[in-house]
Amino acid sequence: MNRIYLDHNATTRPDPAVQEEMLSCLDEVFGNPSSLHSFGQQARSVVDLARNRTARLIGAAPDEIIFTSGGTESNNLAMCGIAEALGDCKRHIITSSIEHRALLNP
């Protein structure tokens, strides 16, 4: 029986090249990139390289690239960022009741 996956908006299988890069990081570069020790600094250099590659890919500046842990954190960052950018006089964001909770809650 053939199965068809139709939930790509929730998650999608990574490209094999991405999987290979991730596996090498999980195995060899597992330090906290915010730490000052050599393991952390090695991880920081990998994160910085990924940030630069991503920026170049989409025509952005590296300091415009923010990595998050997932969709909910990304949605919160975007919604709260929009609200803050609008300032006190225009903090009114309209959405619908069928929107995902990750957007409704913030």
Image (tube, helix red, strand yellow):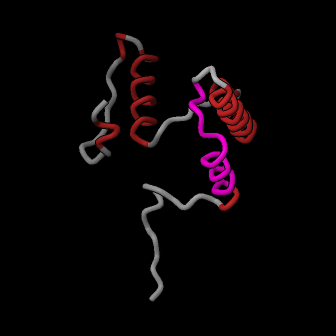
**Is residue 11 inside the magenta stretch?**
no
**Relative to 4, is 97 above or below?**
above
Residue at position x 56%, y 31% from top? 32
Residue at position x 63%, y 56% from top? 19
Residue at position x 34%, y 28% from top? 93
Q: In the picture provided, is 1 more to the left or to the right than 96?
A: right
* Farthest top residue in view: 88
**Relative to 20, is 2 above or below?**
below
Seen from the viewer's position, the closer of residues 78 and 13 is 13
**Relative to 35, is 100 above or below?**
below
Residue at position x 36%, y 16% from top? 90
* Farthest bottom residue in view: 1
**Relative to 12, is 47 above or below?**
above
Q: Position of residue 94 (x, y in %)?
A: 32, 32
Q: Quadrant of the C terminus?
A: top left
**Is residue 20 inside the magenta stretch?**
yes
Seen from the viewer's position, the closer of residues 60 and 92 is 60
Q: Position of residue 30 (x, y in %)?
A: 60, 39
* Farthest left residue in view: 97
Q: In the picture provided, is 59 more to the left or to the right than 69?
A: right
Region rendered in magenta: 18-34
Q: In the picture provided, is 33 more to the left or to the right than 88?
A: right
Which secondary structure dominates the residues rendered in magenta? helix
Q: Position of residue 5 (x, y in %)?
A: 46, 71
How many numbered markers are drawn? Answer: 0
Q: Quadrant of residue 25?
A: top right
Q: Quadrant of the N terminus?
A: bottom left
Q: Position of residue 88 (x, y in %)?
A: 35, 10
